[in-house]
Image (tube, helix red, strand yellow):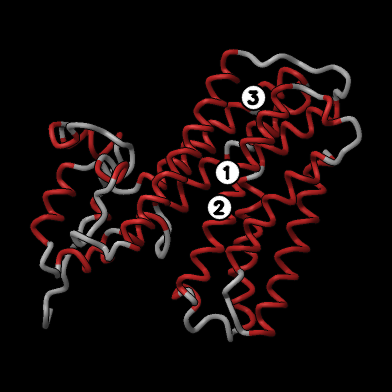
Amino acid sequence: MEAFARAGILTANMQLGGFIFAYLLQTETFYDIFGGLNFLGIALLGLKQDGILASSDRFRTMSVLFIASRLWLLMFLAWRAHHRKGDTRFDGVKDKFGMFLVYWLVQALWCFIISLPLLVVQSAEELSIGQPSKMSWIDHVSAVGFATGIAFEIIADIQKARWVAAGRQGGFCRLGLWKYSRHPNYFGEMLMWWCAWTLSHGAVTQSPDLWWTWVTASSSPIFTMYILLIIEGTGISHAEGGGLKRYYESDFASHYDEYRRKTSPLIPWVGYEYLPSFVQKFFFFEWDRYKYRPKVKGG
C-alpha cells in the first residue's frame, strides 16, 4: 500500500504548505493550481518507482489518461485564475485562518479521493512487477470512455472560453457541445472518473488482495458527482437554481427558457424535450433544485 501512503503524504504537505503560503499573502489565486499540481505529483511519484515503467498496459494507459486529464485541468485553472484575477468563493474567507484552512483541507480530500483508481493500479503494479497482465475488453472500453470524458471536458471548456472571448453573444453559450448539454464539461468530468474506476478493476484480478481498495475507489466518481450535482456553491447547483437569475432577468429570458426545455442538464442528448418528465428527472438529473424561483418582493 505504499502508493496510498505516498499520495497521502504528498497531498498533506502540498495542501498545508499551500495554505500557509496563501494565508500569509492573503490570496486565493493559486488555490486551484495547487490542486492540479497535487494530482500530477501523485501520478509522477508512481511512475518513478523502480521497474514500474516496464509494467502492464493497464498501468501505462491509466497513467497517461490520468496525467492528460489533470494537466488540462491545471492549465485551464491557471488560465482562469489569471483571467478572473480573483475568486468570489473566498470572499470574506481568506482572512479567517480556520475557515480558509477548511477550504484547503477539502481540496486535499478531493485530490486524494479522486486519485484512488490510479492508486489501486499503482499498488497492483508494485505488488506484481515482472508479471504484467493483459488488458481485458472491459479495460479497453473503460480507457476509451476515459479518453472520451477528457475530450468532452477539453472541447467544452475551449468552446465556452471562445464564446466568452467573443463577447458572450446571445446571452448564454450554445456553441458546439453546449447545444446538446447545459453542462458538457461536468459530464466529461463525471464520465472520466467512472471509467477510471472500471479501468482499475483489472488490478483486482492481478492482485486479489486489493479487492477492498477497488471497492473503496468507487468513492472517486461518487464524490465527483456529489460535488458537481449537489454541493451548493459549485457545479450545477451553483450554475443553476438561483444562478439562473442572470438569464431569466435579462433580455434573453425567453430564449434561455426554450434552451433549457430542449437541452439536457448533463448528458448530451438529441431530442431531449421529447423524453417523458420522469426519464428527464431520474436518468438525466433534471432535478427541481435546479429550477429558477424568483424571490417575491415583500414575501
Label 3 environment density (alpha carbons within 10 Å; few <14, some 14–19, many ≥20): many
Q: Is residue 111 left or right of residue 295?
A: right
Q: Nearer the viewer, mark 2 or mark 3?
A: 2
Residue identified by numbered label 3: 201
Compare residues 104 and 145 and report the one nearer the observer: 145
Callout 2 secondary element = helix
Label 2 environment density (alpha carbons within 10 Å; few <14, some 14–19, many ≥20): many
Marks 2 and 3 in Cβ contact (< 8 Å): no
Residue 129 in the image: above or below residue 250:
above
The image quarter in which residue 50 lies: top right
Q: Nearer the viewer, mark 3 or mark 1?
A: 1
Marks 2 and 1 in Cβ contact (< 8 Å): yes
Res 69 label: 1
Labels 2 and 3: the sequence-earlier one: 2
Res 73 label: 2
Labels 3 and 1: the sequence-earlier one: 1
Compare residues 8 and 84 and report the one nearer the observer: 84
Amino acid under disc 1: Ser
Residue 23 in the image: above or below residue 159:
below
Q: Residue at point 75% right, 28% down?
A: 210
Quadrant into which the C terminus falls: bottom left
Callout 1 secondary element = helix
The image quarter in which residue 163 lies: bottom left
Q: Residue at point 26% right, 63% down?
A: 168
